[in-house]
């Protein structure tokens, strides 16, 4: 898998999976535009020639337009887009029958609209380059119902799958691929509640046929494969990276 002298935009790059993916790409010689609400994490690597970081709200159209275009301008085009930004607000995201619908709107804006916005501004650069690849992050939570419910999260993640496929079909003729990863439970800042709780980790791992929670590097490896030329004939695919959870009857 070679990413040398290619350019990627990673949305949600201050978080667990986004940062792992950005670091893995930089290590392989890719130049990476990174964006997140959080300030720039320390020790990203690659130096000023390897990455550029934008702190801001990815549901804000003007911010996304500026960040994607500035990345392409700085590094001479754009080959890859990775969408990992997301929120799982267990305390506020509940059943549609009793949640605050402002929370619904905000979750949709972050988990879905931000993906649409990054694609909107990345596609013209990929077309100008003669092709490209995108990987979007949904969740195995998109595949079924849940009780207690996180209805906005689940619906936003299901919509990401549909958007991924639409982008795959719309831009296949331009040499642009679009695939979606459905992670299973993964140790990252999003799942902070498990970090100091060995019992909870063991309980969750007990649901996973491979017997452990995922790491952010498990996700980065799958993501880099889908971005790479090794996946050149794969587009419009939803890939569970879940240790076998969704394979169980
Ligand atoms: N961790 C898991 O168990 C798990 C499981 C299934 C799916 N996922 C999905 O994978 C993706 C990555 O998850 P993660 O575990 O790395 O989570 P994370 O919380 O570590 O990272 C998500 C990042 O998104 C950023 N973000 C949130 N709102 C934003 C906004 N408005 N503008 C800019 N940035 C914003 C956060 O600051 C955070 O850095 C998410 O979309 C998540 O829903 C995670």
Image (cartoon, rainbow, N blue to C red):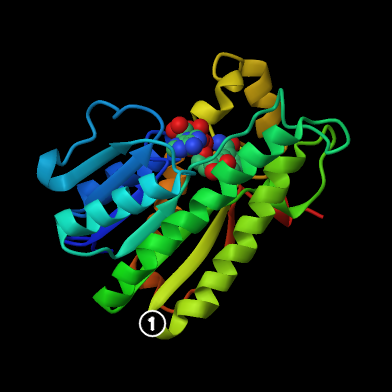
Q: In the orientation shown, which residue stands out farthest toward the front?
A: 62
| Residue 88 image-quadrant placement | top right
Q: Neighbour class for label 1 at 10 Å: few (<14), some, many (≥20)?
A: some
Observer-nearest residue: 72 or 181?
Answer: 72
Residue at 41% across, 54% down: 82
Q: Is mark 1 within 8 Å of ligand 1?
A: no
Q: Does residue 206 appear in this view?
A: no
Q: Does residue 111 appear in this view?
A: yes
Residue 52 placement, left or right of 122? left
Whether 20 is drawn above or below 187: the answer is below
Residue 39 placement, left or right of 183? left
Residue at 68% across, 55% down: 158
User: Split into 4 quadrants, where in the image is the C terminus?
Assistant: bottom right
Q: In the orientation shown, which residue stands out farthest toward the bottom?
A: 173
User: Split into 4 quadrants, where in the image is the N terminus?
Assistant: bottom left
Q: In the orientation shown, which residue stands out farthest toward the right?
A: 97
Element at label 1: helix
Observer-nearest residue: 162 or 141?
Answer: 162
Whether 10 is drawn above or below 206: the answer is below
Across and down, in percent, residue 244 comes to: 66, 51
Residue 15 placement, left or right of 200? left
Q: Which residue is mark 1?
A: 174
Residue at 42% across, 55% down: 118
Residue at 74% across, 54% down: 143
Across and down, in percent, residue 198 comes to: 61, 17
Observer-nearest residue: 156 or 143?
Answer: 156
Whether 21 is drawn above or below 91: the answer is below
| Residue 129 image-quadrant placement | bottom left
Whether 69 is drawn above or below 166: the answer is above
């Amino acid at each position: 898998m070679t990413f040398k002298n290619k350019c990627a935009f990673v949305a949600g790059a201050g978080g667990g999976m986004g940062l792992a993916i950005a670091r893995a790409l930089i290590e392989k010689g890719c130049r990476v535009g990174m964006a997140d609400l959080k300030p720039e994490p320390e020790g990203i690597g690659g130096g000023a020639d390897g990455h550029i970081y934008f702190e801001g709200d990815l549901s804000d159209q003007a911010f996304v337009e500026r960040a994607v275009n500035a990345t392409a301008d700085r590094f001479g085009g754009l080959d890859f887009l990775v969408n990992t930004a997301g929120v799982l607000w267990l305390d506020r995201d509940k059943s549609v029958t009793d949640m605050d619908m402002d929370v619904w709107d905000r979750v949709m804006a972050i988990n879905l609209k931000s993906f649409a916005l990054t694609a909107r501004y990345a596609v013209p650069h990929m077309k100008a380059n003669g092709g490209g690849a995108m990987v979007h992050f949904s969740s195995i939570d998109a595949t079924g119902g849940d009780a207690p419910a996180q209805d906005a999260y689940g619906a936003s993640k299901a919509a990401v799958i549909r958007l991924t496929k639409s982008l795959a079909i719309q831009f296949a003729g331009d040499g642009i691929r679009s695939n979606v990863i459905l992670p299973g439970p993964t140790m990252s800042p999003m799942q902070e509640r498990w970090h100091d709780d060995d019992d909870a980790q063991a309980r969750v791992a007990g649901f996973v046929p491979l017997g452990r929670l995922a790491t952010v590097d498990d996700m980065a490896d799958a993501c880099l494969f889908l971005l790479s030329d090794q996946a050149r004939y794969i587009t419009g695919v939803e890939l569970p990276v879940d240790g076998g959870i969704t394979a169980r009857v």
